[in-house]
Amino acid sequence: MNWLDQHFGVTAKGSTLRTEFLAGFATFLTMAYIIVVNPAILSTAGLDFGAVFVATIIAAMVGSAIMGFWANWPVALAPGMGLNAFFTYGVVLGMKQPWEVALGAVFVSGVLFLILSLTGLREWVINSIPKSLKLGIGAGIGMFLAIIGLKNAGVVVDHQATLVGLGEFTSLPVILFLVGFAIMVVLDKLRVPGGIVIGIIVVSIIGWATGTTELAGVVGSVPSLEPTLFKLDIQGALTATMIGVVFAFLFVDFFDTAGTLTSVANIAGKIDADGKIENIGRAVISDSVATIVGSLFGTSNTTSYIESAAGIKEGGRTGLTAVVVVVFFLLCLGFAPLAQSIPAYATGAALVFVATHFMRNMLDIDWDDVTEYAPAVLAAILMPLTFSIANGIAIGFITYAVVKIASGRVSDANPAVLLVAVLGVLHYVYG
């Protein structure tokens, strides 16, 4: 085991092999829900559930392995929440684009992400986007996930007069949704690792026992990747219609990654005496490569998981933590029948619970400056109400540029903001 210690610098970081293993297990438990939720969401867009199940695990393994072995960060990766919902409900179902084209857009966004990661453009972009818009967009993604989860669970339904209304609140699926959500909240409060997974499993078992949903099996052969492997349509993604989609994938993935890494850098001991973040370049590259690989196998953008903080809190300080996560994902490949048997009200509870974490972004918006908070709030509100992350981003940036210029604060509308705003206008005029 000495080579593990030497390669990852476990002892040098004040950790132990046992601590790194336990940290990796804790991180895995907090993010394992994606194995079920991601294929459930993408299969709604027409992708094969089993193939996406395997693609999800492969993308998580590749990203986490690069992050661990090469970047030496205790951060795990997997297909991102919000991005998978945008893929399905925004691009495929909303814009009526084939899922193959949507995968092509994921690939192109990953390549652009990699280019940004390899050049100084990364810092320029990160520093140029207003903090308020970053926070508003993060909160909007949370609300977007929430309405999808509530809809899938039957809590929110269509209503001719009011657009939306309350579903059959006393029905067993809705009750189980509420039970699952409550379990996740309580376990999170008690700091029990894997609270989301536990909540999903508990309500699923109740659903299977009561006949509300059917258990197709637990263990089986690894599903075939053939239905989605290399099925992406890159040419279809390089059209005027898809420019906004590619940018939306890129924007959300890029800033989600940047936010996650900067958030965990301090507690992971990744900030040196000069305030610089250790191996941040390698960490961001890990993310972009994983997105490219994931699109080839058949899943939406892969990103760094803020849930990695659970492992870091357990003492994980090196890339060995991420490598342990890889091993646990590998062990899950044979559980496709179980994953496919998880009911919508169970995954819906997970979506809404994850959404509550995204909503914390609203706290840090500058509420003393209306030209900051108004565009941010508008961007957030439009995402769930138009069922599109892209609309929220585009209109948020357009509004931000207009109000800053009109109020005489032209310097706040920097070149990056103006570029995105112009692209947004062109999208609505010609798209």
Image (tube, rainbow, N blue to C red):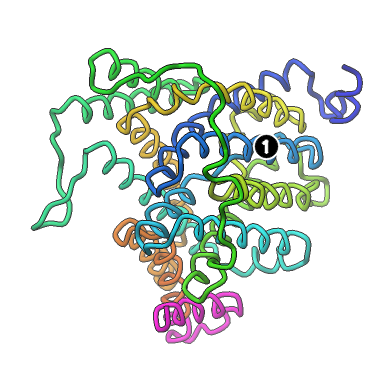
Q: Which residue is mark 1?
A: 75
Which residue occupies the extreme left position in the image? 161
Q: Is residue 409 left or right of residue 110?
A: left
Task: Sort mark 1 into few (<14), some (14-19) or many (20+) by Cα contacts within 10 Å.
Answer: many
Helix, strand or loop status at disc 1: loop
| In the rendered image, the vertical position of residue 6 relative to residue 137, given as above or below | above
Residue drawn at the location 44% of the way across and 71% of the way down: 394
Q: Which residues are magenta?
A: 402-431
Q: Is residue 8 left or right of residue 23?
A: right
Q: Is residue 413 above or below residue 219?
A: below
Residue 209 screen position, x and y as percent: 27, 12
- Give how far across and how far down residue 149 sits, in percent: 33, 41
Q: How many marks?
A: 1
The one of 22 and 58 positioned closer to us in this rendering: 58
Residue occupying the point 71% across, 34% down: 74
Residue 392 falls inside the magenta stretch? no
Q: Three-letter amino acid code at disc 1? A: Val
